[in-house]
Image (cartoon, helix red, strand yellow):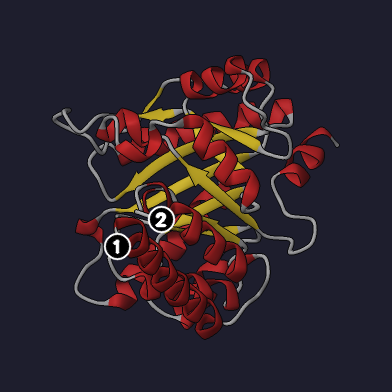
Amino acid sequence: MVKAHRLNRLIDSKSNRSIFLPIDHGTSLGPLQGIRPLHKLVNLSIEHNIQAIIAHQGVIQKIISSGINTKGLEFLLHVSCSTSMSSDPLHKQVVSSVEHCLRLGVAGISVHVNLGVEKEYEMVRDLGSLCRKAYEWGVPVLTMINVHEKTVGSTHKEFAKNVSHGVRLAGELGSDFVKVQYPGSFEHVLDAVTAFDLPVLLSGGENVSNHRELFSQVKTAIDAGMQGACIGRNVFDDENPELISHCLNEIIHQDKQLDEVWNYYEATKVKQKEAELINIR
């Protein structure tokens, strides 16, 4: 019952889908500009119907202690960490716990697992232990599965198969949500979402310059059965995170068509450029 209540807090009641904003990148990539103003990220999430922010314990503690209004917004405690300075940055270490999630009063935990890397077995073992502990306390678990490049092989089919394998792994070990990369097509997404009965969310991946492609992938994923998205850098590191968040909300929660969303995006960009020129004059 407790876990069901926490899960409900992470899912939009109307669309039955979720948008999560991960801002855990500071430990791995350093102080990216987009994750510095915490109050702006909180306000962005509330305004654009983002269900939860995913962050490390210090960030959540800072937001809570600062008195920022977080009404209507949930948090997931990210418990995995590594840095880009490490000789093995793909080996994620567990740096927090289910118990600390409960002390913070947040909705659940987030765990990162890289597949196809040397220390995969340790991350898989840690995921199993965390899921078992989370089950004892009724705490939801989001597993971030990342299929590493060396496992991709030479075809989209092989990559898609590995993504589906990741979904199955997360489900069998007890995850409540799983975030995966875009597997390449509607059919491949369909295979991934049927690999195990749990909500599958689309990963945003690295920064993109082609926003239509991003929106197209999100739309295809939703149409094929994914239940939301977990997008960080392509939101907070964009020059207009408000516009990106609005468009994601339109696709995921409002079921808007791709062309309609794209036309709004382009029209808004034109208006913003015109406003900038007026201000310069």
Residue found at the far bottom of this picture: 259
- From the top left corner, tell me how far across and down residue 10 is, in percent: 69, 45
Residue for point 72% across, 25% down: 137
Q: Secondary structure at mark 2?
A: loop
Image height of 67 relative to 131, above or below: above
Q: Is residue 229 visible?
A: yes
- From the top left corner, tell me how far across and down residue 151 is, in percent: 25, 59
Task: Say which quarter of the image contains residue 119.
Answer: top left
Residue for point 30% across, 60% down: 281
Q: Is residue 175 visible?
A: no
In depth, the one of 31 and 98 nearer the eye is: 31
- From the top left corner, tell me how far across and down residue 245 is, in percent: 52, 57
Q: Is residue 73 left or right of residue 279?
A: right
Q: Which residue corresponds to mark 2?
A: 240
Q: Is residue 185 left or right of residue 176?
A: left
Q: Which residue corresponds to mark 1?
A: 208
Task: Say which quarter of the image contains residue 71.
Answer: top right
Q: Quadrant of the N terminus?
A: top right
Mark 2 or mark 1, which is nearer the start of the sequence? 1
Q: Secondary structure at mark 1?
A: loop
